[in-house]
Amino acid sequence: MEYTVQLNSLLKLFRQYMNDDKDVTRFYARCRDGTATYKDVYDLADKAGVKMSDLLKKQILDQFPNGIPPEAVDAIIPPALREQCDAVIAGADRVQAIVNKKAGVSLAPAEMHPDEDRILGLADHFKESGFTDEATELITNLAKATVDETIQANAEFQNDSGMQVTVTRVYDDVGLNHGKDPCQWCLDRCGENVPYSTAVDMGMFERHPGCGCRIEYHTVKGTKIQSNWRRNVWMDSDAILKWRRGLGLE
């Protein structure tokens, strides 16, 4: 297969990073002692996305100064992004097992796989537009969306198993243009303790590139399963309403 050498070199470097990085090592230590949370998984996704983007730039772009040929994109980008997603899924699976146990939920974590539509869509984007400045944001967004999908799959699984599941999504306070303007798209998808089916209809599990909103859900059986969000602050409904009024949104 053409470009096998480049792909194997990239994957080897990525795996080495995920095995040796101190923060990743600490994450798996917390998994072993049962203290890891979805906050840690989102941090893992950030690290995986940034590193994969960096490796693609250094290992691939330098070899194609006049642009990556479409056949090289097809050979390298999808398997590289699958590797990134697999690393995030592995971490999320460990954490989901922990939070299920703490919540008294006797279900195995939902089985997850990389989102092929997202991966192939990114590959098509790079073929059409090249590896642009926004590449890191898009690749990291894929990693974070993998966490979102894991949370949703487990929430849906528990909801379908007869548990009452509610979802909370809180605005990340980053907004548009580096925080100068609030992101109405995100605000329309934020809410607290929303029933699962309504949360899906509202698009609470959706994410745009650069989005920093974090999602959490809980069941009536146990403790809140929290993916954390950028400020790591729980906002009740009154606090969200007051905050939105301060922005002139209510």
Image (cartoon, rainbow, N blue to C red):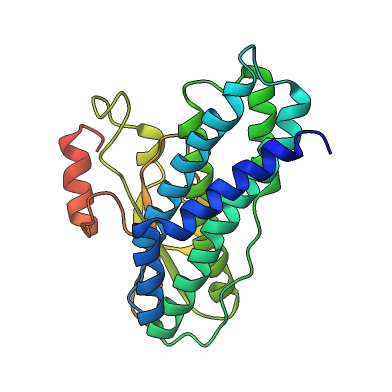
Q: Residue at x 50, y 45 (%)?
A: 206
Residue in the image at 28% along x and 49% along y: 230
Q: Is residue 236 left or right of residue 33?
A: left
Q: Is residue 153 visible?
A: yes
Rendered location of residue 73, percent (x, y): 71, 29
Q: In the figure, residue 210 lies in which quadrant?
A: top left
Q: Residue at x 55, y 65 (%)?
A: 90
Res 156 quadrant in image: bottom right
Q: Nearer the viewer, residue 116 or 127?
A: 127
Q: Is residue 92 above or below residue 126?
A: below
Relative to 115, 173 lies left or right: left
The residue positioned 55% from the left and 58% from the top of the image is 87
Can residue 221 be seen? no
Toward which corner of the image does residue 103 lie, by quadrant? bottom left
Name the residue nearer the viewer: 69 or 173: 69
Position of residue 107 measured from the top left corner of the image (x, y, whole percent): 55, 83
Is 235 situated above or below 241? below
Give the image location of residue 104, x and y in percent.
Answer: 42, 88
